[in-house]
Amino acid sequence: MATVSLVIKTDKDPNEFKKSSQPDANMNKLENLLAGLNCGAYLGSVAVHASSSDPAYATGTITLASAVATNTVTIGKTVFTFTSTPTSNTATAVDVEVDGASDTADAAALAAAINANTLGAATIVSATSALGVVTLTALVSGVTGNYIALAKSGAPITVSGAYLSGGAGGPAGTPEIIGR
C-alpha cells in the first residue's frame, strides 16, 4: 500500500485541531485549511511526500551483561544511569535500579524506566525486554526513526548501533510543494 504524507506550513494556529480522539472535527478543519491555502485566504504551503511502500519503524537493541551502577544508556537526549538507589527522573536524566545479578530483571527495569519517561525517551520510542535485551521501536514510522541516537557507557552493555535503524518509507526524497 502506498503512503502519502503532508507537511503543511501556515500562519494558522495549529492548536485549533482537536485531540486525535476527534478525527471528524480534525478532518473538517483540515479540509477548510487546505481550501483556504488553495484560494489564497491563508498563507502557507503543502509539501506532499509519496512512498510506494508501507513505512517501517526503526528499531534498536540494548543488551545487558551484568550491568553495574554508573553504567549509562542514552536514547535521544535522555541519559539512563544504572544505580542501586534511584533518585533522578527528569526528561533528560533517569536513574534505573539494577542489581547486576539478573540481566533479565535489569533489562525489564530499564524498559520500564524508558516507557515511564513521558517527557523524554518515551516521546520518541517504546521499549520491551526479554532475557537481558531491551528492544526499542521508534514511535514514528519511516526514515525519521533512523535519526534517534543510541549510546552506552560501560563494557557490560552493548547497543545495536549509534542510531536506531531499519526505518523506511514515509516522507523521503524531494516533496512536491503545493500552495503559495
Image (cartoon, helix red, strand yellow):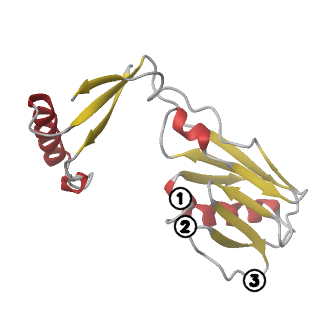
Residue 160: percent from left, percent from top: 76, 42
In the image, farthest residue toward the top: 52
- Distance between the Cα atoms at labels 1 and 3? 22 Å
> Is disc 1 in contact with disc 2, using a CB cutoff of under 8 Å?
yes
Q: In the rendered image, which residue does mark 3 sit on?
A: 85
Mark sitting earlier along the chain (1/2): 2
Horizontal arrangement in the rendering, residue 126 relative to residue 75 (left or right): left
| Disc 3 residue type (three-letter) | Thr
Q: Position of residue 75 (x, y in %)?
A: 65, 55
Q: Residues within 10 Å of mark 2 (few under 14, many from 20)?
A: some
How far across and down, in percent of the image, does residue 33 sit?
15, 39
Q: Residue furthest right?
A: 155
Q: Nearer the viewer, residue 125 or 40?
A: 40
For label 1, the residue is 122
Give the distance between the C-alpha atoms of the residues marked 1 and 2, in whole angstroms.
7 Å
Looking at the rendered structure, which numbered label has been put on residue 92? none
The number of callouts visible is 3
Which quadrant of the figure contains the N terminus? top left
Which residue matches tag 2? 116
**Mark 2, secondary structure of its residue:** helix
Mark 1 residue crowding within 10 angstroms, few (<14) / some (14–19) / many (20+) = some
Give the residue type that dot 1 points to.
Ala
Q: The residue tagged with tag 1: helix, strand or loop?
A: helix
Amino acid type of the residue that numbered disc 2 sits on in the rendered structure: Ala
**Residue 132 is at least partly visible in this image:** no
Callout 3 environment at 10 Å: few (<14), some (14 to 19), or many (20+)? Answer: few
The residue located at (67%, 83%) in the rendering is: 87
